[in-house]
Each structure stands twice: as structure tokens, then as C-alpha cells.
């Protein structure tokens, strides 16, 4: 026997198994028409993404990912704080392009309204609207078409990228559902963002949004202008927001400085968000889509019910919507569903909940009925018969 060949085959077999189990990070290049530049982004997919081919994932967008530690810390902390591992993390990079004399601040800062554009951040500013268009028209559609993503999206930024994600809420409401703005600069362009917080029409938000704001010791011994601007935003959010569509959490870390505050601040923000996350999920679409759901069951005698997040699915009543028996091992149902649809299968009560093959076991089944009209699922186990 050729032992070297044997061990090579054994190594490749183990490598194949572990490659499926391990998280994966890819670097993607986009030729951006919006920016007329070539841009790069990092994409983290969690363990078993390939194996759980029916599972869909919430997406976290991390700005300033050219500083790789931001991106890596986000996907690492999610595994310690999130109730499940069903998250994809996208790192959006901003880098200095020497040939264009273009810097990260061009991405993050809009054209000034109150200062001379030539002196405002030494001229490295003013392209935030195009950068936002790149995110909205190119990055997010790319993720939606190439990965199994849910409709909910989280934005995370630090310093000027924290200012940018808040600016995105004012310019493109409902692009994101949650905003983690760590040490944002509210003072630029003569406190422009203070005015935007106060003047924004919060009724433009389609559903309740989550905003997490934090700061370190900025404004105490340095960047003095940050403190009064920040206090004005905090006071407004604590006392004056004329809408129930925005929930804000504010946390101060005065013992930290600007850069190191990202880690403790992010941890606190995640813990706060996941305590109330269900409040911030996107609304169902106004339009319904006809879909057919087919299910392969384990036993001939199984009576199966489908239950989920809307009236057509029984509003999570486990015994209201019964599937039709097509044959001994096939059940089916035709429904008009709004998007996104989440559901489970039971045999009439929650003690008999079914796990779905290729969907991470007991996770909700998630579908986008506007994209596909027919779905095939298979029960892998019933909870009361494991």
C-alpha cells in the first residue's frame, strides 16, 4: 500500500469536513459604477453556512473595515452575544487611493453646508452621498443576490464612519434597521448632525429602528468641540424625539480613549440590542405572493401543521393551519404570503415541533416569497420523538 497516498487522501477528507464546519472569510472586489472606483469588501459566513443550505442570515455591515480589527471583532463578538450564529458580516473598506488623492474621509463626510469645502477636512470630504449610493445600490444588492440574506440589516461604525451611518438614516431611511454608532463626531460642519437629528421626520421610518450611541473621553482633554455637540444630541434623544419609531440606547465610557473604546462599547451595544431585537424586525410587505410549500415527512401517519409570522400562517398558532396529505410521505399547502415569511412545522402543538433538514435543526424556516414560488422541505426529526 502507498502509505503517503493513503495519508494524503485522509488529510484531504478531514480538510473537506472541517472546511464545511469552519467560518469562512472572503474578499470581494466590486467595480463600482457609483464611485467610479474599484472597491473591496470582506464577507464572513458562519460555521455550517454551506451545510445549512436553507438557512437565511441577518447581515451586519461594518464600516471602516480597512482597519481589519473592527471587522474581526464584530464577527467574533457576535458568537458570544447573539442568540444564534445566523449572521453574515460584511466589512466595507475605505482606503486611500493615491492616484485619485482620495481618502476615507471622502467616503464618510458629506459636502459641507457651513464651511469652506477647500478647508473642510483639508478637502478630503464631500462624497458621502455617492458612497451611500454605493452601499445601497451595489453592496446590499450584491449580498441579496449572492448570499442567503434576510431583510434585516445592522450598520456599525466608529468615529467618522459612526457619523456616516447616522447620516445614512437621515438620507436613506430604512436602509438599515439598527445603527451602532461608536464615538461619532457630531461637531463637524458647525454641528450639522445636531440639526439633522432635530429636523429629521421620524415618521419616514417604516418600523421601529434601534440606535446605539456611545462615547469615550472625546471632548474632555481633546477635540473640545465634540462634547457640547454630543450633549445636544443626547439631550434630544432622551427628551424630545417626537416618534415611537426610534429606540435609542446611550452609553458613556469616559475611562476609555477614542480607539480602545470600540471593544467594550460594541459588547455593551450587542447586549442591549439582543435583549429587544424582535422589536426592530422589518415589517411584512404590503403585497402577498402565492407560494406552494411541499414537505417530506418521516412517518405515514404524520398530520402536519405550518405556523408562522402572519395571519396566513396562523400567527404562530401551532394547530391552526393544516397541510394537505398528498401521499404517505408528502404534505403540501398553497398560501398567499407576505415577505419575509418565517415559519415552523408541527404535528399540532409546540411539543411536536419539527426540525427541517439543511436548516440548522430547530431554526425558523425563512423564505422570500417574492423571489421563489415553490419550496421543498424535509423533516429531519420531531421534537417529541428524538
Image (spheres, helix red, strand yellow):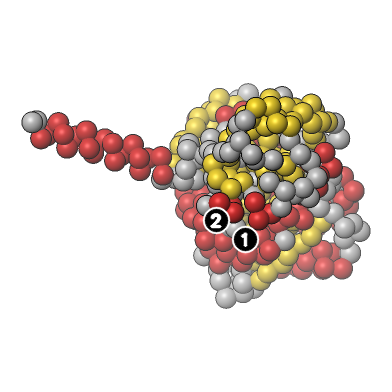
- Quick check: can you spot residue 211? yes
Task: Please give the residue where the numbered disc 2 appears in the rendered image.
Answer: 78
Q: Residues within 10 Å of mark 1 (few under 14, many from 20)?
A: some
Res 232 → quadrant? bottom right
As displayed, is residue 367 above or below residue 105?
Answer: above
On the image, the x and y values in percent for residue 213 come to 70, 62
Q: Tell me what residue is drawn at x 71 percent, y 56 percent.
A: 277
Task: Please give the residue where the numbered disc 1 appears in the rendered image.
Answer: 270
Depth check: 332 or 33 in front? Answer: 332
Secondary structure type for disc 2: helix
Asked if disc 2 and disc 1 are in contact, CB closer than 8 Å, the reply is yes
Res 183 → quadrant? bottom right
Depth check: 364 or 262 in front? Answer: 364
As displayed, is residue 26 above or below residue 218?
Answer: above
Q: CA distance from mark 2 to mark 1?
A: 8 Å
Question: Which labelled disc corresponds to residue 175?
Answer: none
On the image, the x and y values in percent for residue 209 come to 78, 52
Q: Tell me what residue is drawn at x 49 percent, y 32 percent.
A: 28
On the image, the x and y values in percent for residue 267 come to 57, 64
Q: Residues within 10 Å of mark 2 (few under 14, many from 20)?
A: many
As displayed, is residue 90 above or below residue 334?
Answer: below
Q: Tell me what residue is drawn at x 9 percent, y 30 percent.
A: 2
On the image, the x and y values in percent for residue 380 come to 54, 41
Upstream in the sequence, badge 2 or badge 1? 2
Secondary structure type for disc 1: helix
Q: Is residue 26 left or right of residue 156?
A: left
As displayed, is residue 241 above or below residue 58?
Answer: below
**Residue furthest out toward the left:** 1
Q: Is residue 314 left or right of residue 103?
A: right
Depth check: 210 or 299 in front? Answer: 299
Q: Tell me what residue is drawn at x 35 percent, y 40 percent.
A: 17
Amino acid at each position: 500500500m502507498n502509505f503517503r497516498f493513503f495519508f494524503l487522501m485522509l488529510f484531504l477528507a478531514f480538510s473537506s469536513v472541517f472546511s464545511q464546519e469552519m467560518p469562512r472569510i472572503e474578499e470581494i472586489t466590486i467595480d463600482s459604477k457609483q464611485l467610479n472606483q474599484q472597491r473591496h469588501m470582506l464577507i464572513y459566513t458562519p460555521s455550517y453556512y454551506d451545510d445549512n443550505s436553507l438557512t437565511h442570515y441577518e447581515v451586519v455591515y461594518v464600516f471602516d473595515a480597512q482597519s481589519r480589527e473592527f471587522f474581526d471583532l464584530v464577527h467574533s463578538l457576535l458568537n458570544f452575544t447573539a442568540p444564534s450564529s445566523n449572521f453574515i458580516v460584511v466589512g466595507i473598506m475605505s482606503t486611500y487611493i493615491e492616484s485619485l488623492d482620495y481618502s476615507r474621509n471622502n467616503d464618510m463626510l458629506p459636502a459641507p453646508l457651513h464651511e469652506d469645502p477647500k478647508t473642510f477636512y483639508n478637502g478630503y470630504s464631500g462624497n458621502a452621498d455617492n458612497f451611500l449610493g454605493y452601499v445601497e445600490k451595489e453592496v446590499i444588492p450584491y449580498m441579496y443576490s449572492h448570499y442567503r440574506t434576510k431583510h434585516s440589516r445592522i450598520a456599525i461604525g466608529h468615529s467618522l464612519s459612526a457619523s456616516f451611518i447616522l447620516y445614512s438614516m437621515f438620507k436613506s431611511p430604512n436602509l438599515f434597521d439598527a445603527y451602532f454608532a461608536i464615538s461619532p463626531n457630531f461637531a463637524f460642519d458647525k454641528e450639522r448632525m445636531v440639526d439633522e437629528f432635530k429636523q429629521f421626520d421620524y415618521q419616514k421610518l417604516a418600523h421601529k429602528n434601534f440606535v446605539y450611541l456611545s462615547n469615550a473621553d472625546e471632548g474632555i482633554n481633546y477635540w473640545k468641540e465634540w462634547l457640547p455637540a454630543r450633549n445636544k444630541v443626547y439631550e434630544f434623544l432622551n427628551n424630545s424625539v417626537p416618534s415611537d419609531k426610534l429606540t435609542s440606547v446611550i452609553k458613556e465610557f469616559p475611562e476609555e480613549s477614542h480607539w480602545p473604546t470600540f471593544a467594550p462599547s460594541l459588547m455593551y451595544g450587542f447586549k442591549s440590542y439582543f435583549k429587544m431585537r424582535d422589536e426592530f424586525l422589518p415589517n411584512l410587505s404590503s403585497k402577498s405572493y402565492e407560494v406552494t410549500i411541499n414537505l417530506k415527512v418521516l412517518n405515514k401517519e404524520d398530520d402536519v401543521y405550518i405556523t408562522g409570522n402572519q395571519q396566513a400562517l396562523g400567527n404562530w398558532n401551532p394547530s391552526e393551519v393544516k397541510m394537505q396529505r398528498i401521499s404517505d410521505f408528502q404534505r403540501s399547502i398553497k398560501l398567499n404570503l407576505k415577505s419575509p415569511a418565517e415559519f415552523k412545522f408541527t404535528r399540532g402543538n409546540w411539543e411536536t415541533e419539527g426540525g427541517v433538514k439543511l436548516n440548522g435543526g430547530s431554526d425558523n424556516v425563512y423564505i422570500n416569497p417574492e423571489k421563489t414560488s415553490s419550496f421543498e422541505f424535509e423533516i429531519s426529526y420531531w421534537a417529541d420523538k428524538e
